[in-house]
Amino acid sequence: MNKAESERLGSYLEQLGYQPTASAGEADFVLLNSCVVRQSAESRVLNKLDAVKALKKSRPELTLAVTGCLVDSDFDQLRKSFPYVDHFFKAGDYPGWLEKGGVTPPLPLHPLPSTFVPIMQGCNNFCSYCIVPYRRGRERSRPLEEVVCEVKELVRRRVREAVLLGQNVDAYGHDLPHRPDLAQLLSELNSIDGLARIRFLTSHPRDMSPCLIEKVACLDKVCHEVSLPVQSGSNDILKAMRRGYSVEHYRQLIAKIRSRIPDVALSTDVIVGFPSESADQFQQTVSLLCELRFDIVHVAAYSPRPGTAACELEDNIPAFEKKRRLSEIEQLQEGIATQINRRLLGGMVEVLVEGKKDGKWWGRTRGGKLVFFSSGSNLLGRLVKVKITKTSPWSLQGRVNTS
């Protein structure tokens, strides 16, 4: 979401006559888009602000603005904490103070073959560890017709893949008149000529409906890839996290998805070291990951976020133990991903070519797997068949099919 917003803010500034620079030292205007979902992310933001503070001191005429999840409703406190920042504005907004008459928030001026399309903002779930509802507010969906129109324009600009974004993307439309849902939006987008692929993330297990599963299964442009955070394998921890589902419900949901979409690639998120997570509760998470065998597991150590319900709990898992638990899951998942990806060795996959790195073209399969291969032709934006010649837990290597 932050990457999508940064792209559009850049387009907004270019529309106002600004041009990007190679470094902050050359800039007249510096805009920081912040993430504070975890302490490590917030620390990076604060370090960057310190660096820009020095720049501002040496060049007082420099305009400095900050947006993203660091910015809450207490603008006065932000100005006291960061007096050298000229402007603050909330995540998802546009700096209207730059243009009195207003400028229509634009599409990315330089879209890639695969482009992020935010379809909603905010979240209504208020998980006990999460700052998002407090910084981005309640769920606000964009009108279905507006999203369809935007994707059509992106396709006209040669975008091949639309990645639909929301903090809780499968809750899309619940707040709109006539209550369209994500399944209906996928059907509308699937009919757009020239669009090759559709993805969406991130989903919440409580809102993953049978109808949505069916659309992923039957719509030819919707990729067989589902991101479904579980967070913990312990019902007690899930309850403390206020996730709103049980391990049993989650397990049944995964079974339904795999039954209807046998080749689906599944990813999940896990938090280790949540307050009072016992060794046994952690092992329940490990056992669930061993059982369900995800293609990708994003694992993070719990860090308190001021203002959330979990911040009132004692953060009583030592940092070294959080690190140990995180490492255990990373090693477990490396082995699982190695075995899953090895099945693709010698097979043929369809890849949407998104760019070139270190002399090799790269792109993703319909299951979201990263593939690298060599070719002397310009393949940017094309769908190509690649034979897999080497696998690893993180990516695949192959050669393009020239027949």
Image (tube, rainbow, N blue to C red):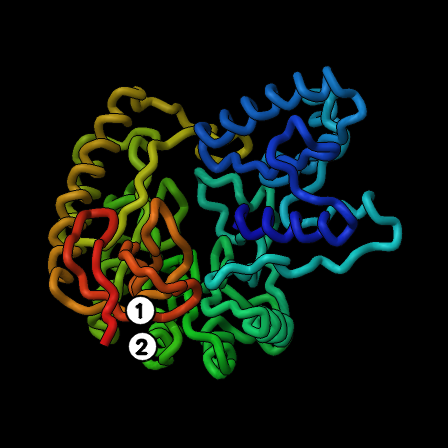
Asked which quadrant contains residue 362, the reply is bottom left
Looking at this rendering, what residue extends furthest in the right direction? 100
Residue for point 64% across, 50% down: 92
Q: Residue at x 55, y 32 (%)?
A: 307
Q: In the picture provided, is 20 more to the left or to the right than 227?
A: right
Which residue position is annotated with label 1? 224
For the C terminus, the quadrant is bottom left
Q: Residue at x 79, y 48 (%)?
A: 96
Q: Nearer the viewer, residue 95 or 238?
A: 95
- Callout 1 environment at 10 Å: few (<14), some (14 to 19), or many (20+)? many
Instruction: Find residue 191 and report its horizontal and vertical position in percent.
Output: 48, 83
Mark 2 vs 1: CB contact within 8 A: yes
Front position in the image: 329 or 74:
329
Please provide percent x and percent y for residue 398: 21, 59
Q: Amino acid at mark 1?
A: His
In the rendered view, does 298 fall on the left or right side of 393? right
Q: Secondary structure at mark 2?
A: helix
Let me know if residue 281 appears in the view.
no
Q: What residue lies at 22% left-to-right and 31% top-to-bottom?
A: 327
In terms of image quadrants, where is residue 328? top left
| Label 2 crowd (10 A; few <14 / some 14-19 / many >=20) | some
Left or right of 183? Residue 373 is: left
- Looking at the image, residue 175 lies above or below residue 232: below
Above or below, 87 against 247 in this view is above
Disc 2/disc 1 C-alpha distance (Å) = 7 Å
Q: Is residue 400 visible to us here?
A: yes
Which residue lies most toward the front here? 376
Amino acid bearing label 2: Ala
- Quarter of image, res 49: top right
Q: Residue 217's mark?
A: 2
The x, y position of residue 21, in whole percent, is 65, 38
Tell me which numbered mark, 2 or 1, is placed earlier along the sequence: 2
